[in-house]
Image: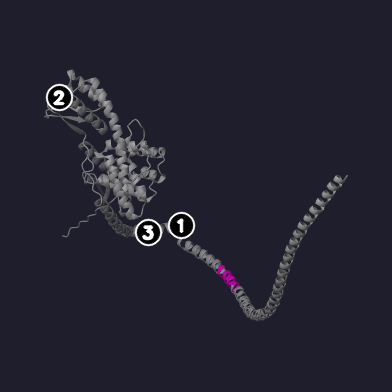
Amino acid sequence: MDQQFIIVFLGLSAGVLLGLIVGFFWFSKGKKVSDKMQQQIDSKQRELQKAESKLSEARNQVKTAEAEARASSKEIIAEAKLQAGEIEGKLEQQSGRLEEKEKQLDEKVQEIERQRASVSKREEDVEELKTELTDASAKHREALESVAKLSQEDAKTQLKEEVESEFSDYFAGQIKLKEKDMDEAYEEKAKNIMAEAMQRYAAEVATESTSTIVQLPSDDVKGKIIGKEGRNITAFEAATGVDIIIDDTPEAIIISGYDLARRYVAKLAMEKLLKDGRIQPARIEEVVEKMKKEVGKMMMEFGKRATEELGITGYPPELLKIIGRLRFRTSYGQNILKHSVEMANIGRVMAEEIGADPQIVVEGCLLHDMGKALDHEVSGTHVEIGVEICKKFKVRDEVTHCVAAHHEDIPIETAEAFVVAAADAISGARPGARRESMEAYIKRLKELEETAKSFEGVHRAFAISAGREIRVYVDTEKINDLEQEKLAKDIAQKIENELTYPGVIKVNVIRERRVEHQAT
């Protein structure tokens, strides 16, 4: 029992002691927390006092700003009122001016109305006078017709016939004088332009021949070329379409033919066969076919060179090949591709001088004879074929017109087409450019003379200057001065429509009247 009591007592004592310890610690901690909170409260109170001080200071600043704003607003209001007064004064002045202008305008409108009424009255008076004048003129004409016993139309016709009969020589002389002055001025200008164009471009003047000479290493080769019973030369001529002339010319044979392409193929094939040494019909056909392909490639190259030289781009390969084929075509012995390039260079200079489009002229000159590149199997004139080729390859309409009109098959409508036609005449008519056979030359001169003699009143006709001029002598009893002018134009028109000729032909109609008297 005592032990239990002691244990209980000790337990109670320990619990009391533990409670005291815990209470001490709890009291110490609570006091620290309280002190800390008190510090925070004091800090907040100090901040609050500072904020109140700042607030009071801000209120003072606001009051000061309000006082300043009131003073400034009063000044602004006063200044605005002053400006408003000035603006109102200006508006009143402008309003007065506008009223004055309106008044002046009203007065002008009234004046215009009065003038319009006056003009209308005058117009009515004029119309009345015109009517009276017309009536008087009609009565006067009727009186004259009654006296003269002629109607107005009959009088005009009679007067016209009398004037033409009496003054025909005078009028013809005046017409000739005016035409002469104009022709001299235009001819001088045209000569200057053409001379400058020709001087700025120099081209070859030699014509193409109808034969080609091939040099041989020795005369012994001629036998191989002929072959047994002439088989080799026959096969060669059949494959190439040319004639081989083997004569006494030492170490040379002649390839004859009008087609330059065939002659060139034959020349290349012959040189290849001579170099190879194997000359037999099978080998001849093989080499000729190979040379034809090479010439086809050369045509494309010739077309490219021509367009590059003239600064033309964008043409398709098929068109370039047709252009290159012109290198193997001739007109009166003149190489057509060289002729076209020469035309293009001359035409460009002329176009620049007169203000035409040089590019259209250059293309028109290059393509103008393109129809001659195709073989005879294609029907139509070279102009018609050339136009079809231009349409096929979508060449510009302006260039196509130059091709269609360069021989005046259709009316010339543009300056560029005139330049192309002029360049064609210049290139074809220059000395050494073209040639023709003696038979064709004589035939052409006779046709010119017969064409001129077919007109009534022509006494004699002579073709002179190598067919560049036809001189016609007329009967003075049948042809007067006015009819002389018409006759020259009619002869020129018939020559253009019926004859084929290179260049330009001058028609010179001469009317001579000789009067003889004898003094006894």
Q: CA distance from mark 2 to mark 3?
A: 84 Å
Residue bearing mark 1 = 153
Residue bearing mark 3 = 162
Q: Residues within 10 Å of mark 2 (few under 14, many from 20)?
A: some
Furthest toward the right, the residue is: 1
Taking the image as shown, residue 331 lies to the left or right of residue 142, namely left
Displayed quadrant of residue 107: bottom right
Residue bearing mark 2 = 222
Q: Quadrant of the C terminus?
A: bottom left
Q: Residues within 10 Å of mark 3 (few under 14, many from 20)?
A: few
Taking the image as shown, residue 100 lies to the left or right of residue 519, namely right
Residue 94 pos. (x, y %): 62, 78
**Rendered position, 452 above or below 213:** below
Residue 176 pos. (x, y %): 30, 57
Q: CA distance from mark 1 to mark 3?
A: 14 Å
Residue 49 pos. (x, y %): 72, 71
Query: Is residue 296 among what the camera can see?
Result: yes
Assess whether residue 118 is covered by the magenta stretch.
yes
Taking the image as shown, residue 520 lies to the left or right of residue 394, namely left
Three-letter code, disc 2: Lys
**Rendered position, 438 above or below 74:** above
Q: Tag 2's secondary structure?
A: helix
Three-letter code, disc 3: Glu
> Which is nearer the N-term, disc 2 or disc 3?
3
Magenta highlight range: 116-127
> Which is nearer the N-term, disc 2 or disc 1?
1
Three-letter code, disc 1: Glu
| Colour approach in the figure | one colour
Taking the image as shown, residue 155 lies to the left or right of residue 449, namely right
Q: Nearer the viewer, residue 158 or 110?
A: 110
Q: Residues within 10 Å of mark 1 (few under 14, many from 20)?
A: few
